[in-house]
Image (cartoon, rainbow, N blue to C red):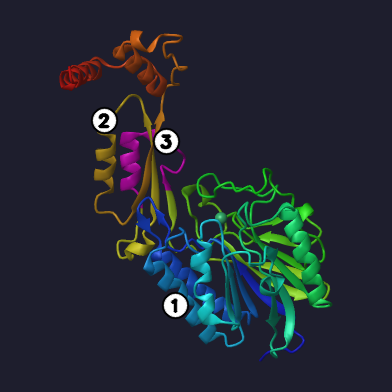
Amino acid sequence: MTDPARPFRLIHTSDWHIGHELFGHDREAEHDAFLAWLVEQLVAEQANLLLVTGDVYDVANPPVTAMARLYRFLRDATERCPHLSIVIIGGNHDSAARINLPAALLGPGRVHLVGSLARCNGVVDLDRLLLPLPGEDGETAAWLAAVPYCRAGDVGPGGLAGLYGEVLAAGAARAGTLPLVVTGHLHVAGGDISEQSERRIVVGGEEAEAASLFDARAAYVALGHLHRAQAIRGETPIRYAGSPLPLSATERHYRHSVSVVNLAPGGAEVRELTIPRHAPFLAVPEGGARPLAEVEAAIAALSLDAEAERGCWPFVEISVLVDGPEPDLQSRVLAALEGLPLRLTRIVRVAARSAGQGTAPQGADLAELRPEAVFAAAFDRVHGGAPPDDLLRAFEQLLVETHAEEPR
Ligand SMILES: [Mn+2]
């Protein structure tokens, strides 16, 4: 039963990166699990709106399988939730034109794809950017300012602050007493970034201050780009929903969630729904790098589900403490992993001895540098100390062969 007095409810999620690969391993099973879970949440929460704040695909030119996955989800979600609206905005990973493309087919229906900032004669087209959102009874219950990721050329002379100022004024005027939701795909100052997978995007030379962009005219500000779910300090609830799954090993400790937002008369109430982790992320050994023999033992001691489907096999990062070049390290690690239901992301070598302090010959003329000396300096920098004799001989042999091949 639906409660007629229930406030407008939206589910905010972001940065799906459909089509993502992690060190060559696809994430299809994880995306399928997330999207199936999301449909169930939309049904259970009786959501009025699903809002996806950009980077829906991982790359500007996503594979057909990724696009099919999104379209299948849109069909499932609209079938299961007859009153649900869905709005997807473009992110910096997305091609604005590709996101926009199906909009012509969809028309003014319940699914809106906003890849780029619509302009008309050079002026922001507020009629296309501001969307009325139907409530339970089909009447407009809230308004959305669907602002996608803006490239430097998109924002106009007033910068982001000018753009959002214009959008907030027009949105508030249109919304009247109804709540206004504003979106963005950008990095605001104070946001917590992950090291490997979010490009630092700055429009207009400096990071935008959330307070300079958004104010209490918006009941809720839904942001995308940062993969960690987080609230940003401001006059009104401002939130990154975060990605549904870790997009790099550095994100493996994030608690991925979607945000359920009730637009109550007294202000927005936000709660998080934790997304189940479909494929675990393991670090072996757990406590950090150990010598190779111990790493091999740690791999052998893992308790793994041999029956699991490949799409839920754990991702594993291996860290080995090395005391020299250890040329057979990779093959020994691969041999230890052979036949196990694991997906290797990378092998990290950690030097046991503190490495040398960059003893590259200083001030030398390039023509005067001896290759052997450069090699020894490079070895010292990486491993510490002098290269062992057999390695030095192998290098000298290489030098001889290289010189022999040079044209005279
Ligand atoms: Mn992004």
Residue 298 colored in magenta in the image: yes
Badge 2 amino acid: Pro
Region in magenta:
283-302
Q: Secondary structure at mark 2?
A: loop
Please indicate whether residue 203 sits to the left or right of residue 107 in the image.
right
Residue at image point 29% right, 13% down? 372
The circle drawn on residue 72 is: 1
The answer to whether the residues at label 3 and label 2 have Cβ atoms under 8 Å apart is no
Is any atom of residue 94 visible in this view?
A: yes
Residue at image point 29% right, 41% down? 333
The circle drawn on residue 204 is: none
Q: Give the percent coordinates (x, y) of residue 241.
A: 62, 62
Mark 1–mark 2 Cα distance, whole angstroms, equals 47 Å
- For the C terminus, give its image quadrant: top left
Picture quadrant where residue 85 is located? bottom right
Front-most of 187 and 101?
101
The circle drawn on residue 327 is: 2
